[in-house]
Image (cartoon, grey):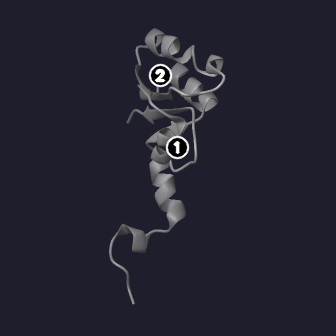
Amino acid sequence: MRKHGLNGIFSKEIMAGALSKFCIHGINKVTNFIRKKKVSMVLIAKDVNPIELIIWLPLLCKKYNTRYLIVESKSRLGKFVKRKKTSCVAIIKH
């Protein structure tokens, strides 16, 4: 029997790959993409411990004229990129 919709046609790996074309996560990747000016917006978690890991990220965003948004928790950001937790997420320009 044939399934209808995108979930029936494509595997979970392909659908997760489609999401990875639009956003990236992790402090190192996000920092590199901001410096290359390939990011349109950055989402930063508020409850990162120690805070020194991300305290400089809004300043970097201001330096490169990138919009940023502080989000309530790491777990909410993690749900956005289908992970358990993540400290920051960047949405890539197209």
Tag 1 residue: 78
Tag 2 residue: 37
Q: Position of residue 89 (x, y in %)?
A: 50, 34
Q: Residue at x 40, y 32 (%)?
A: 93
CB-based contact (under 8 Å), mark 1 and mark 2: no
Quadrant of the image containing the C terminus: top left
Q: Residue at x 50, y 68 (%)?
A: 11
Question: Does residue 78 appear left or right of residue 69 in this picture?
Answer: right
What's the residue type where badge 1 is placed? Gly
Question: Does residue 35 appear left or right of residue 52 in this picture?
Answer: left
- For label 2, the SS is loop
Q: How many C-alpha atoms fall within 10 Å of the one at disc 1: few (<14), some, or many (≥20)?
A: some
Q: Earlier in the sequence, mark 1 or mark 2?
A: 2
| Label 1 – label 2 distance at C-alpha | 23 Å
Measured along the vertical axis of the image, is residue 12 above or below residue 39? below
Q: Position of residue 47 (x, y in %)?
A: 55, 28
